[in-house]
Image (cartoon, grey):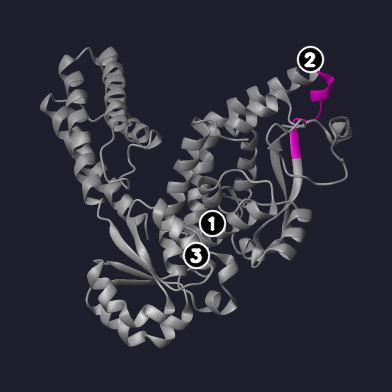
Amino acid sequence: MRHSKNILSRIIFFIIMYTAYYKLFHIFNRTDNAAFYLMFLIMGLAYYLVGYLDFSNGKLEKNDIVYSVLINTVLGSINYFFTKSKKEFTVFLILIIIANLIKYILAALNNSKMNVLLAGENDLIDKIKQSIINSDRHVYTGQCCCEGVDRLKEIVSEKKIDMIIITEKAILKNHQNLLLDLKLKGKKIQTYWQFNEEVEGKIDVTKIDERWLLYSLGFNILHNTLQRRVKRLFDIVMAIIISIPALPIMLLTAVLLKIAGLLDKKEAGPLLFTQIRVGLGNEPFKMFKFRSMITKENWAEVGFDPHKESWTTEGDPRVTKIGHFMRKTRLDELPQLLNVIRGEMSFVGPRPESVPYVEELERELPFYNLRHAVQPGVTGWAQVMYPYGATTEDSLRKLEFDLYYIKHQNFVMDVGIFFKTVKTVLSVKGR
């Protein structure tokens, strides 16, 4: 997978950073109290949230240096405020150098690019060509049509090809020995479908069938009881942890909603918006959100049919003033903690849709019902990989990411998605 190197690099980064942090502080006989460990956790989270731990671009950016200086200086200043120790402040400055040195080395190790040749001449070529061009790890070198496959060895040698991507099944069938020979000589052979998963993190649902789904590896979440229990345990633990700071925030949000309703009658209405959504096994459940729109009785005033479901659009007039802020910060989603605790939702999974949308999208999109093979989520792979969408085409794109998630779901992936969502919330990118 394309993310495995990045994850491994992050693990190595944290091991080295913690070792340096621990050793440097113990030179000055620092006590291993809660504040000692909390400071390191805050440092690690800060590095993640600013994007410092992305090693895929293969280099140490100027912004990385700036961020490391800011993070360590701020944390060092906070530490100095409580300890009055100049020596410990110096430790944070030394950690700037160590962090950037580690980032430089790990990024360089991730910078190996592969020369890629496409073999085929169908409609997939343009799709995959653009993916290669956008990739940090691959270099597009050209295309070999079906008639030229017999010259593949010569082309591979001339252009120093590292990887061949097959877009037509006929090539796989008719040239197996040739492709196997190239593979044994160290060349990476992949199909369009494999490359799409590895680089784009999605599965092209328009190019698969029931046979592919039946024999494809992965999808362990569907039958692995232990995996499902670990996921449920993660949900319960995180729900308890998040509920502690969330409860006062939810109370304040409720008060602000009531005040907004008193100041403007158009914004008046119930605190919570509840809607029947489709969950695991196509079972309907009631999902909770803070109400961020005017009530349906007032939809007609802003040009919307109150009897018809419709996606939220940019600048949607139905969204209230305080609702706009809640959507940007995702505060409207906080009541879904109750759905998670009740076991109707997970923290991570495909976002649940309302019954009318599901019925429509199941008619329009292939394999849409597969989303309901797992629990729906407060956030998901599609949400962190694709912007907000309000069309059937957007739903298709998100389905591709959802299917990838169902195939590859694991605990580490869930944790990564959770923190990517935290980063999105703090950057105020909701709608």
Q: Residue at x 75, y 32 (%)?
A: 293
- Mark 3 is on which residue type? Lys
Going from N to C along the chain, the mark reached first, 1 or 2, is 2
Please report the residue visible at 63 percent of the width from the left and 33 percent of the height from the top.
327
Q: CA distance from mark 3 to mark 2?
A: 49 Å
Quarter of the image where the C terminus is located: top right
* SS under mark 2: helix
Asked if 322 appears above or below 368 in the picture, the reply is above
Residue 403, magenta (yes or no):
no
User: Of residues 137 and 431, which is closer to you in this image?
Assistant: 137
Residue 260 located left or right of residue 296? left
Residue 407 bears which disc, if any? 3
In contact (CB < 8 Å): disc 1 and disc 2: no
Q: Residue at x 63, y 51 (%)?
A: 394
Name the spot of residue 170 as percent of width and height, x first.
47, 83
Q: Residues within 10 Å of mark 2 (few under 14, many from 20)?
A: few
Q: Foreground: 273 or 13?
A: 13
Q: Is residue 410 visible?
A: no
Say which mark, if any, is on residue 263. 2
Task: Measuring from the top left, give residue 116's x and y in whole percent.
Answer: 33, 64
Q: Amino acid at mark 1?
A: Phe
For residue 272: magenta? yes
**Residue drawn at x 80%, y 18% as measured from the top left:** 264
Tag shown at residue 401: 1
Whether the residues at callouts 3 and 1 have beta carbons within 8 Å, the answer is no
- The earlier-in-sequence mark between 3 and 2 is 2
Choose the circle earlier in sequence order: 3 or 1.
Answer: 1
Nearer mark to the viewer, of 1 and 2: 1
Q: Establish if 174 lies above or below 22.
A: below
Question: Magenta segment range?
Answer: 264-273
